[in-house]
Image (tube, helix red, strand yellow):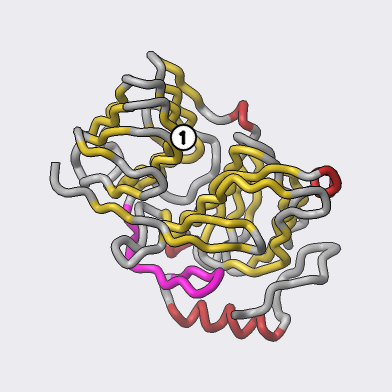
Amino acid sequence: MPPLTIIRPRAEEVEGQPILRPLPSAKCRSVGPFVFFDHMLRTHYPAGHGMNIRQHPHIGLSTLTYLFEGQLQHKDSLGSDQQVGPGEVSWMTAGAAIAHIERTPAALLAQGSTLSGLQVWLASPKEHEQGAGHYSHHDAGSLPFSDNLGVRIRLIAGTGFCMTSLVPVLSPTLYAQVHMQTATTLLIPAEHPERALYLLEGEALLDGQALEPHCLVVLPEGDDVTLCAESDCHAVIIGGSPLEGPRRMNWNFVASDPALIEQARTRWAAGDWPTVPGETGRIELP
């Protein structure tokens, strides 16, 4: 196997929530449709405190939030108002213009809570960049799941490992959560042109090479690889077909044409944007 491309994430903070962000990176701008990857580190919020990401805009992407612990309330300019819990998928396609908020629900805010999980952005195909917005929520029980010889795979979105998720992705996608018991193995087939693995917890070997937790490892295109668990492990695998061309990312905007980003920035600054019902606070342009 050729040398692995290893992306060590940078530490960031989003409205008080510590995160690790391996994508985007100078080493790798995208993996399949994935252009952004945030690992929300396990954080305990005492009573009266929680996540509160005020109203902000998006274009040209879909966000997918997947929690391991805690709950978030999602509200958007389409009128969606949904509480999202562990193992559930919150999927929002921005299209030409959408705004949303994410915050700790009031009940958990009052009593204190613990939050951890992942949020990824998937760039929309060019034909959908200026399309209509969409939101859907998917219960944990609706996600395909396999459990075989100590290896548990939950397909969050897309296709892979002989399963298909109902999350309405816009291009060929692979997004899987994997739990492995010590001494088990998993063949990761080259069924998608681009793939990467992020080890959340545990010790593992990839074709004999030791993996470092909290690093995104880009897998060689066209090669099947074998993941071996040296201890109990928790990982996610992302991937899919490559984008039709490069994407530009500026703040919360993703587009194939820089002019679309400039238009979006101008509109948001001017207040010419769909608003989330009942919300007045917003995040201004950086």
Look at 62% across and 31% down and name the residue there: 140
Q: Which quadrant of the rendered structure holds the N terminus?
A: top left
Residue 35 belongs to magenta span: no
Tell me if 122 is positioned left or right of 274 in this view. Answer: left
Q: Quadrant of residue 232?
A: top left
Q: Nearer the viewer, residue 217 or 111?
A: 111
Tell me if 139 is positioned left or right of 20 in this view. Answer: right
Give the structural element (helix, strand or loop) at label 1.
strand
**Callout 1 amino acid:** Gln
Tell me if 57 is positioned left or right of 146 in this view. Answer: right
Residue lying furthest left in this view?
A: 2
Residue 247 belongs to magenta span: yes
Q: Position of residue 12 (x, y in %)?
A: 52, 63
Tell me if 58 is positioned left or right of 106 in this view. Answer: left
Q: Which quadrant of the rendered structure holds the C terminus?
A: bottom right
Q: Quadrant of residue 25?
A: bottom left
Q: Which residue is mark 1?
A: 177
- Which region shows up in magenta? 242-255
Compared with 253, 151 (above or below) is: above
Q: Position of residue 187 (x, y in %)?
A: 28, 28
Look at 49% across and 68% down and name the residue there: 254
